[in-house]
Amino acid sequence: MKIYSTLFLLTTSFFLKAQIQDPTLVDSIHLNEITLKANAILGSKFEAKNRTGSAYYITPQEIKKFNYTDINRTLRSVPGVNVYEEDGFGLRPNISLRGTSPERSSKITLMEDGVLIAPAPYSAPSAYYFPTIARMQAVEILKGSSQVQYGPYTTGGAINMISTEVPDTFGIFLTSSYGSFNSGRLHTQLGDSKKNFGYSVEYLNYNSNGFKELDNGENTGFDKNDFVAKFKVNTNPEAKIGHAFELKFQYADETSNETYLGLTEADFEITPFRRYAGSQQDEMNTEHIQFMGTHTLSLSPNARITTTAYMNDFNRNWYKIDYLTVNGQRESISNIIQNPDTLSNYYDIVSGTANTGTNDLIAVKANNRNYLSTGIQTKLNYRWGGDNTIHDMEIGLRYHYDEEDRFQWVDDYSLTNGTMALINGRQQGTDANRISDARAFSSYALYKLKYKDLTLTPGIRYENINLGRMDYGSTDPERAGINLTERENQVNVFIPGIGFNYNFQNISLFGGVHKGFSPPSNQVGEKPEESINYEFGTRFSYGGISGELVGFYNDYSNLLGSDLAATGGTGSLDQFNAGEVKVQGIEFLINYNPLTNSKSFALPITIGYTLTDTEFLNSFGSDNSVWGEVAIGDKLPYLSKHQFNTSISLEHKKFELNFSGRYNGAFRTKAGIGPIPTSERVSANIVLDLGAKYRYNDNISLTTNAMNLLDETYAVARVPAGLRPGLPFGLFGGVELRF
């Protein structure tokens, strides 16, 4: 902390001195960037289009078009984003940026309001908590060289979700909808701002009975609550030195009857929405609490210091079937679903067609985990220059601590006539019983030089990370330390990058190179994931057509894979060395409105395409067969090579119609090359959505949404234990009130 304080004072003194020396500087080219909200990275479409690296800004208007609650659907329009679904509702997304491993979105920097939001982003980065997109005002996606500002994961990029801001004037907002699968949503906000203070109170409930069908007819849906309160105070706008402080409190809980148990190939073909009787006890319970305080010190129109302290506390217990014991022999659910014929006595029990015998048990594991993520971060922005030259310096510091506390157990059940009954409830802490933690100090400096039409942004990031684990073992649930084992790993790394952008009249060229980095686990001596990443692209606007074309190449010297239960592993979170890998691709986006001359209508059309090509440059055998036996030339698993999306909207002041289509190419669940074996293949799918809104007046609007318009039946995943379906056709109607 002494280092943090010293650096903060030194940088503050430097910027104060510089400001005193030249108090009259005005940024005539790019002044609006310094006045962005403190929680934003980009803040607008304009900023995204003028950045030296690839960036995308999803506006409030775009989010409202379909009223999505599913982040997967929201992100599918963004080039370079690769997602695979899991539950059909987007409760636990798997997001990849430019070919990073998508499992649990663990290889990208996830933020809400500029603060790390994964439960334990350093020590256990799998994002079992993900903010609800329905309460977000905007989403920012950052790729390319300038992302060294936002770590620790710098290979693929960063996603920042901006929560609903405190309104400028008094307002009440309420939206309510109901539709297929007994799905309901209620979202309301009340807020106001005065000269020196403002507030906002927001509540969201989202629930459904689910579209899957348990053999015993029980509910397969979920119920989510989300509450956010904000309060801000500030000095008078005309004050020479401005202060603003915003306090944010957020609470969320979720109960979802979700499982890892999927279907066999044969059962999926016949009844794709079935859930086996063996999963009837499966349930996820979560609770998330956030406290966040942000102070903004405006020294002048060109100098600002923003400091944020934060705390995220997340508790989850995913109670779900893990394995079966038949006649004393144990088999995992993944093996049973993969081999239903050879393991027919196990399959008959898990599917509910046979009863358990005297020596048979269904093991349901309580994956009980508590997470803590807390820290303080500050950044200093200073800008100076003249008519043709603008200089912009940003320096950031962060101290962060997080931990994951696993305190798990396994209960035994019998099954009789399709109904499970508890026969042996085990003591808490008699399965996984360990604490993993991380302490990280990071800093960065990003310098932007704008000379006429040329912009250069060299930057560097530093990460000092200490990772540890205390394993008490399954025989010490009291944590007396009888068989305690400890391990520790440390990383120090510099992450440089540089980007450029040159504007011509209707076209710009941009590109960059930067170091990709992902922290290792707490295994002693394990090296971090590292790569050198390149991009080159163009943005263009001509004759009513605008868009961008980007090529990227990521050269991994040391790719790390993770042993995740979600991808068929043991769930240890231990990482393994995948060695040298190359990831390359193309991102294409085009926008066109053929009705630009119309005074009554607009017809914006967007077309996007992403090509992601991967290749292992060495051979190895992955631990626990997570990726299988890997040979030179094999392709990375869980990534679609081809993705295509389009959206068409007909907009009028009284109504709008919004159409969205997505093609997601096939992907493999094991590394390999050539045609994908059926047992390792998640097939391609096409999903079409339709949204409509009618504005009765300024205060009342009616909405309707049709999801999966063609009622396409498709699989979203095959791991960890069988095929699982995507959302079938769903129709939802609602009303919006604004006062």
Image: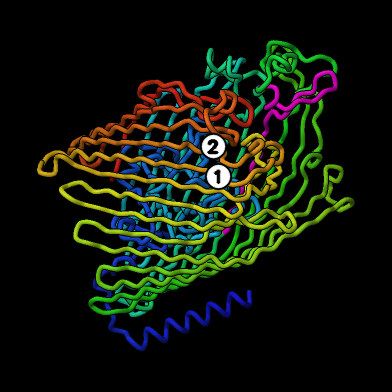
Q: Nearer the viewer, residue 50 or 359?
A: 50
Q: Is residue 320 magenta?
A: yes
Are the residues at dot 2 and dot 1 in contact (C-beta closer than 8 Å)? yes
Residue 573, percent from left and from top: 68, 45
Provide the residue designation for mark 1.
Answer: 101
Q: Would residue 569 be found to the left or right of residue 679 on screen?
A: right
- Residue 602 at what x, y percent from top left? 17, 40
Q: Which of 130 and 499 lies nearest the eye of the viewer?
A: 499
User: Looking at the rendering, in which quadrant would you find the N terminus?
Assistant: bottom right
Q: CA distance from mark 2 to mark 1?
A: 7 Å
Please say whether residue 172 is visible from this viewpoint: yes
The question of residue 365 being in magenta is answered with no
* Crowd band around label 2 with a 10 angstrom C-alpha radius: few (<14), some (14–19), many (20+): many
Q: Nearer the viewer, residue 326 or 9?
A: 326
Confirm whether residue 696 shows in the render: no
Query: In this orientation, which residue lies closer to the viewer: 422 or 657?
Result: 657
Q: Quadrant of the C terminus?
A: top left
Q: How is the image coloured?
A: rainbow
Q: Position of residue 261 (x, y in %)?
A: 63, 26
Q: Residue furthest bottom?
A: 21
Query: For the point 25% across and 62% down, which residue is it?
Result: 503
Looking at marks 2 and 1 on the same chain, the residue that comes earlier in the sequence is marked by 1
What residue range appears in magenta?
311-337
Marking on residue 203: none
Q: Quadrant of residue 73?
A: top left
Q: Is residue 481 above or below residue 68?
A: below
- Residue type at numbered disc 1: Ser
Residue type (three-letter) at the residue carrying disc 2: Tyr
Numbered disc 1: secondary structure: loop
The residue that mark 2 highlights is 638
Residue at (58, 43) in percent of width and height: 128
